[in-house]
Image (tube, rainbow, N blue to C red):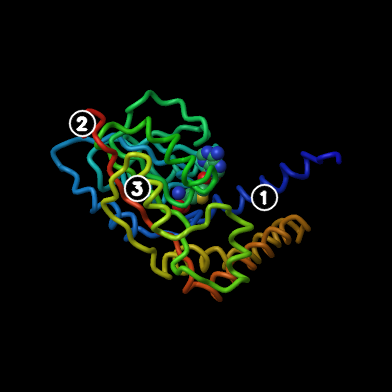
Amino acid sequence: MKVDWRVKMTELEFMINFHKDNKRQGPGSTEDTLKALNFMNLDQEKTYKVADIGCGTGAQTLTLAENINGEITAIDLFPQVLEKLNFNAKAHGLEDKINTRNESMEDLSFEKESFDIIWSEGAIYIMGFEAGIKAWKQFLKPEGYIAISEITWLTKDRPKAIEDYWNNEYTEMATASNKIKILEENGFMPIGFFVLPESSWTDYYYIPMEKRFDEFLKKHNHSEIVKKMIDQTKEEIKMYNKYKDFLSYGFYIAKKSSSNKNI
Ligand code: SAH
């Protein structure tokens, strides 16, 4: 079959165009970011090097820059979102604390042990939780921290409809104990976990996004591709509202073991 890359690119461009004008590109909130950060008990006298992987337009990057003494490297595959992040950083007077890097999370070019903290909200699923943990660990200093938000089943059993929907979207859908096990098996000590509240999905993500559907459709003359994209998002929102008791994002905070500790 011949793949029409032009059509594929257009679809991707619409996606980026739509999502870059949202404040967030995934569920989350300032409170969630601060709550995760609090588990680390950072020393205000020290400076920290932080990587924010899959930063999007940087809702959480700005919170990190405002609350951590140090420097944040914000990484994303798409220059369009980084441009927006740089604009927002300037608007908040945080441009000296934030550097953007346009590269793929799957092929990061940093020196080993470059960072004290690796942060990633709603993005590790792109390469998969386990592959992400394994690939990023090398860039963290011994005893450095990792904070990751990841879609998570909240119950052992759930209705087949939601099970099938998410298993089709993401092969690593699992409960928190599975995710924590992966962290432990890869030399991380879990120091915190919490579940994102419903408002982090609705008030801060879905509701502001829903308000933009009509305007975006109009702007693109109700193009079939845009309609399809919006219909898929509507379906995702419908599924969330119906089955929110069974899934959410979990925030996983862990500390990398010291490499010179002998057992
Ligand atoms: N952390 C942000 C964005 C989450 S959405 C928030 O919570 O709002 C996931 C982000 O990952 C998007 O900005 C997307 O552009 C980015 N992304 C997708 N593939 C990527 C890759 N291979 N490497 C780095 N970033 C990627």
Q: CA distance from mark 2 to mark 1?
A: 52 Å
Residue lying furthest bottom: 242
Q: Quadrant of residue 144?
A: top left
Q: Is 108 left, or right, of 255 in this rendering?
A: right
- Determine whether 204 is above or below 112 in the image: below
Q: Which mark is residue 14?
A: 1
The dot on residue 262 is 2
Give the secondary structure at mark 3. Answer: strand
Q: Nearer the viewer, mark 2 or mark 3?
A: 2
Amino acid under disc 2: Asn
Mark 2 is surrounded, within 10 Å at the Cα level, by few (under 14), some (14 to 19) or many (20 or more) other residues, namely: few
x 29%, y 50%: residue: 190
Q: Nearer the viewer, residue 124 or 76?
A: 124
Residue kind at label 3, given as amino acid type: Ala
Of marks 2 and 1, which one's residue comes earlier in the chain? Answer: 1
Q: Name the spot of residue 260 as percent of width and height, x first.
A: 22, 28
Q: Position of residue 244 (x, y in %)?
A: 49, 72
Give how far apart the Cα atoms at labels 2 and 3 are. Answer: 25 Å
Q: Residue at x 62, y 64 (%)?
A: 165
Residue 141 - label: none
Q: Is residue 194 left or right of residue 143?
A: right
Q: Is mark 2 within 8 Å of ligand 1?
A: no
Quadrant in which the C terminus appears: top left
Give the mark, 1 or 3, whose residue is nearer the N terminus. 1
Pointer 3 residue: 147
Q: Residue at x 77, y 57 (%)?
A: 223
Counting from the top left corner in percent of width and height, residue 95 is at 35, 37
Task: Tell me if residue 152 comes above or below residue 146 in the rendering.
Answer: below
Q: How many marks?
A: 3
- Location of the N terminus (image quadrant): top right
Q: Residues within 10 Å of mark 1 (few under 14, many from 20)?
A: some
